[in-house]
């Protein structure tokens, strides 16, 4: 029988035929596609004609067409809806893909052709985009070890293969811990919780097969439980499980995995002549060097810590006022902070949440994209990889722009967090390819067909990931290697964090924040209180984030620590992390930096991008939040440009200059200290 992953997709808009794909199809499709890619690479390297851009760089860009198609489906599905078979395939595929990558960059004949083009680049009459792709291709080869020889080249290949195995292991260990733990509750244990938390706990209990409600490690369930449960003993138990992910001993413990990853990254960097992995990694980012990252983080750390310490004193006094002795603990902060927010801003999550329906927030994100970029969204009915997934055609001026898929609800088969990926990236080389873009979230799924309700943070996450999606959907480049979000890591969060700002535009919430039961718009007084409280508890949020970013930087800026947990503790002691605020991501579950190289030595990038997003939104506010001229400038210079130019050049073309940290501090309600 024909493998559906390899056959022509005669589906609407060439969507993957999800209803025909089975787990057994992935391995043979992968092996066949990998063989095709290897043959294509060999043909380029063995080409008898002198190297040209077309027969070398263009050919390289097209070498993995079949493999990209197979893996675009597989990794999206495996991350959002894992099965034991898919997890086994991830463990099998990752070292094979790393070995294939090493074969390419170690192919001396292939690299010689790239070098010849590089040496002749001034005489090749290349477009700006082609020059950029040539530079990036050569740089990728060099940074992957193309200039190494003998034992060093072999060792580099072995390191990359082992790191691929360890990254997959880290991810699967974390998913196993998140999937296996839940805390059964009695109906009495739900006392004091808002109805939406009770409903989510009952739905979670049903999913886990518990005889009653339960709390899981899904952020959209455990965070509101920590905010609203008056049962300090249960909050402590839930928080301990949340913090212990990846550090429970046994086969799923990630501490030794993290230590080996750090050692191998250091060795990899030093083989290439860099003093540390951070120096290697940051060379191609906007920051360029670790010292600049540390300077940014510490400029923000001082005012954030001061604000958090002041808040901690207030919350601890509240706790003591209730007769609870001892210091404020991490499982107390959210509970007393929620009470304080209600007292100071008359803002109650239970009152707010019915106005933040998932469907209405999706409509809001779409409506903003329509007003800014002229995009229209039409529901697309087609088989998806899971029943919870929905899809839309994205159209502008009657022409298809992209297919957008949304997978919003938490489930045991989905890894935690929220992300955007492209099942198919935009490009023009080899045909005009329209992207298939996927947003994945982990919102609590309601029971009995009730509307899904979001917290304000959830709604912000939805807008954030949709900002990434716009970066993918509006991409307009020739080469897939620089398409969409293929940009510097500390630039990639700019479109996503910038898009969050439109959730704060009063007219957006006034239109789309409607009550789940009455349909009434959010009262103006409540809307005003919500927007006035946007900087509330920013000391806590900033401290937990910056602490994680500094630990990440310390891990990679110098010799790899023998024991990452000891090194983590040393960093937190040095910076004086307040007792009641943990890192946002402790080492054993710090998937951003250990599931792969993406954010390794780069977790700071959210804040680096925030410096720009705060300034970029000021460009709109200087005229109007929906000013089409400013939106067109944003699309032309950032959203459509992908990695076609250096990130600093892209931002400067949009804004006319690079920003300082002041807008970030203002946006977070922090006053910089000297």
Image: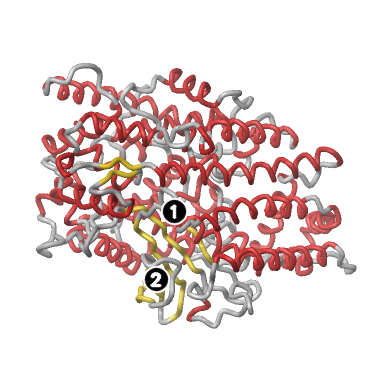
Q: Position of residue 635 (x, y in %)?
A: 45, 63
- Using a 10 Å C-alpha cutoff, classify the residue at mark 1 as few (fewer than 14 neighbours), some (14 to 19) or many (20 or more): some
* Mark 2 element type: strand
Is residue 622 at least partly visible in the picture? no
Quarter of the image that includes the N terminus = bottom right
Q: Name the residue that disc number 2 marks.
A: 391
Q: Position of residue 568 (x, y in %)?
A: 49, 25
Badge number at residue 112: none
Q: Residue at x 61, y 68 (%)?
A: 478
Q: If you read the primary sequence from the N terminus, does the residue marked by circle 1 or circle 2 appear first?
A: 2
Q: Position of residue 334 (x, y in %)?
A: 24, 34
Asked which quadrant contains residue 672, the reply is top left
Asked which quadrant contains residue 625, the reply is bottom left
Q: Residue at x 16, y 61 (%)?
A: 516
Q: Position of residue 597 (x, y in %)?
A: 59, 43
Q: Residue 433 or 335: which is nearer the viewer? A: 335
Query: Residue 566, relative to residue 547: is it above or below?
Result: above
Is residue 666 at least partly visible in the picture? yes
Tell me the colour scheme of the image.
Answer: secondary structure
Please indicate whether residue 332 sits to the left or right of residue 463 in the image: left
* Mark 1 element type: strand
Q: Residue 325 or 493: which is nearer the viewer? A: 325
Please indicate whether residue 634 sits to the left or right of residue 432 in the image: left
Please indicate whether residue 140 sits to the left or right of residue 295 in the image: right
Q: Name the residue that disc number 1 marks.
A: 419
Is the Cβ of the residue at disc 1 closer than 8 Å to that at disc 2?
no
Q: Residue 587 or 528: which is nearer the viewer? A: 587
Taking the view exactly as shown, the residue that stands out farthest to the right is 48
Distance in Å between CA atoms under marks 1 and 2: 16 Å
Please indicate whether residue 8 sits to the left or right of residue 573 in the image: right
Query: Residue 654, relative to residue 334: is it above or below?
Result: below
Q: Residue at x 51, y 81 (%)?
A: 11
């Amino acid at each position: 029988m024909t493998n559906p992953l390899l056959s022509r997709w005669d589906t609407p808009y060439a969507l993957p035929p999800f209803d025909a794909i089975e787990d057994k199809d992935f391995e043979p499709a992968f092996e066949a596609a990998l063989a095709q890619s290897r043959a294509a690479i060999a043909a380029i390297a063995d080409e008898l004609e002198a190297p040209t851009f077309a027969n070398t760089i263009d050919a390289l860009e097209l070498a993995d067409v079949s493999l990209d198609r197979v893996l675009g489906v597989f990794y999206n599905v495996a991350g959002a809806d894992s099965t034991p078979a898919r997890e086994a395939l991830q463990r099998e595929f990752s070292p094979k893909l790393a070995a294939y990558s090493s074969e390419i960059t170690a192919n001396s004949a292939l690299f010689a052709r790239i070098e010849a083009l590089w040496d002749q680049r001034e005489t090749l009459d290349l477009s700006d985009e082609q020059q950029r792709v040539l530079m990036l291709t050569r740089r990728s080869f060099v940074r992957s070890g193309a200039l190494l020889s003998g034992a060093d080249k072999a060792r580099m290949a072995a390191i990359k293969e082992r790191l691929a195995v360890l990254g997959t292991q880290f991810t699967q260990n974390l998913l196993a811990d998140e999937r296996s733990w839940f805390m059964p509750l009695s109906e009495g244990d739900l006392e004091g919780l808002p109805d939406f938390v009770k409903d989510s706990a009952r739905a979670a209990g049903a999913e886990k097969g518990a005889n009653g409600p339960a709390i899981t490690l899904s952020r959209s369930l455990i965070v509101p439980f920590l905010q609203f449960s008056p049962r300090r003993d249960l909050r402590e138990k839930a928080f301990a499980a949340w913090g212990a992910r990846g550090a429970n001993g046994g086969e799923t413990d990630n501490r030794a995995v993290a230590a080996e990853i750090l050692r191998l990254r250091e060795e990899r960097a030093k083989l290439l002549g860099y003093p540390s992995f951070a120096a290697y990694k940051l060379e191609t980012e906007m920051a360029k060097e670790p010292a600049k990252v540390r300077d940014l983080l510490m400029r923000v750390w001082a005012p954030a810590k001061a604000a958090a310490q002041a808040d901690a004193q207030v919350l601890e006094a509240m706790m003591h006022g209730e007769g609870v002795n001892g210091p404020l603990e991490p499982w107390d902060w959210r509970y007393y902070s929620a009470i304080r927010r209600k007292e100071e801003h008359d803002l109650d999550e239970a009152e707010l949440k019915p106005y933040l329906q998932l469907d209405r927030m999706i409509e809001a994100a779409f409506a903003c994209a329509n007003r800014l970029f002229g995009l229209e969204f039409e529901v697309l009915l087609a088989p998806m990889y899971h029943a919870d997934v929905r899809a839309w055609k994205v159209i502008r001026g009657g022409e298809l722009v992209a297919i957008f898929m949304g997978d919003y609800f938490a489930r045991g088969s989905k890894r935690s967090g929220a992300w955007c990926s492209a099942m198919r990236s935009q490009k023009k080389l080899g045909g005009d390819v329209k992207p298939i873009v996927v947003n994945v979230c982990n919102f609590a799924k309601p029971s009995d067909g009730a509307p899904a309700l979001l917290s304000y943070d959830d709604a912000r996450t939805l807008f954030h990931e949709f900002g990434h999606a716009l970066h993918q959907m509006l991409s307009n480049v020739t080469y897939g290697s620089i398409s969409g979000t293929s940009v510097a890591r500390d630039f990639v969060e700019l479109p996503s964090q910038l898009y969050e700002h439109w959730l704060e535009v009063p007219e957006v919430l006034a239109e789309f924040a409607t009550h789940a039961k009455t349909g009434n718009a959010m009262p103006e007084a409540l809307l005003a209180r919500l927007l006035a409280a946007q900087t509330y508890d920013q000391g806590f949020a900033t401290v937990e984030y910056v602490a994680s970013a500094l630990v990440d930087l310390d891990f990679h800026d110098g010799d790899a620590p023998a024991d990452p947990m000891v090194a983590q503790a040393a960093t937190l002691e040095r910076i004086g992390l307040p007792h009641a605020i943990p890192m946002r991501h402790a080492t054993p579950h710090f998937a951003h930096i250990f599931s792969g190289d993406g954010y390794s030595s780069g977790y700071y990038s959210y804040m680096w991008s925030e410096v720009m997003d705060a300034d970029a939104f000021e460009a709109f506010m200087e005229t109007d939040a929906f000013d089409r001229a400013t939106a067109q400038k944003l699309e032309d210079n950032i959203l459509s440009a992908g990695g076609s130019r250096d990130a600093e050049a892209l931002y400067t073309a949009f804004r006319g200059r690079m920003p300082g940290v002041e807008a970030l501090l203002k946006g977070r309600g922090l006053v910089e200290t000297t």
